[in-house]
Amino acid sequence: MRDIKDIKLAVLIDADNIPYSHIKEMLDEIAKLGVPTIKRIYGDWTKTTVSGWKSALLEHAITPIQQYGYTIGKNATDSAMIIDAMDILHDNKVDGFCLVSSDSDFTRLATRLRESGKLVIGIGEKKTPKPFIVACDKFIYIEIISNIEPPKPSFSDSSFSSKGYNRFDKTDSRLIRLIKSSIEDLADDNGWAFLAEVGALIIKKKPDFDPRNYGFNKLTPLIKSLSKHFIVDEREVEKTHIKHIYVKIKEVAKPPIYRNQNKQNS
């Protein structure tokens, strides 16, 4: 199986719908997922709205693609980016695509690329419409990978926010159900499931799942924080210092059943 570090990625950025302020963090995140062999950004560079990108392009070796807006109210950038993506697909020189945009217009493109067997990673803001998110194999929020350190989340404090904005999602019942169903799908006869496989399955079910969305860097501490629902077992591999982590759904103790003491003897 090919190492994830050897996966060649085409990074296509929609300058009209993505802020330039966190480009370094975005590229660092992409580097964890593969090798960005193609880096292009699309926009009308005659407009002042994308002028902030210009200094970042030289620093990070991103190729700007000029696309004039021929019609007022129409986004010509989308068409240019889609055409380029299809050309790259047919050249078959990359293993996957990273579509950096918060625009749902790329939903069909993401679907088409996946139909051709390519890995599709999406990066965008939390305002990104759901259809584009679920069309990707994995979707990462810019707010999570930015270098701004938020306050440490407190799940016991319902008022946790930063100036009225909750950067972290709450560990609610939907997340619990998602994790439980994934464990049940993979569990052995004793109810244990390998945590790495559980994480991979969760992303298949919910492409925008990321422990960082809930204030945790990794899946293990997230699961451990939900000790009311799950049991974690760290098993050291014999003759190595490697630990394999397994997880199991905690059984809920059933309340005792009391018989009616007032029942009359027949």
Image: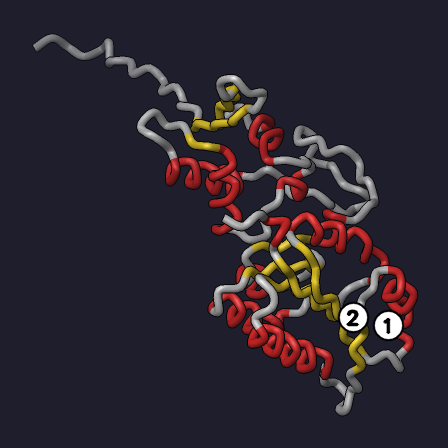
Q: Which mark is residue 50?
A: 1
Residue 144 vs residue 218, the one in the foreground:
218
Dividing the picture into quadrants, the one containing residue 156 is top right
| Residue type for callout 2 | Ala
Residue, x 37% and y 28% (percent of image)? 191
Dividing the picture into quadrants, the one containing residue 65 is bottom right
Q: Which mark is residue 15?
A: 2
Q: Where 94 sits versus 158, above or below?
A: below
Q: Position of residue 1 (x, y in %)?
A: 49, 48
Q: Is residue 96 left or right of residue 180?
A: right
Residue, x 48% and y 23% (percent of image)? 231
- Quarter holding the C terminus is top left
Q: Earlier in the sequence, mark 1 or mark 2?
A: 2
Q: Where 97 sits versus 184, above or below?
A: below
Q: Position of residue 69 (x, y in %)?
A: 78, 86
**Callout 1 secondary element:** helix
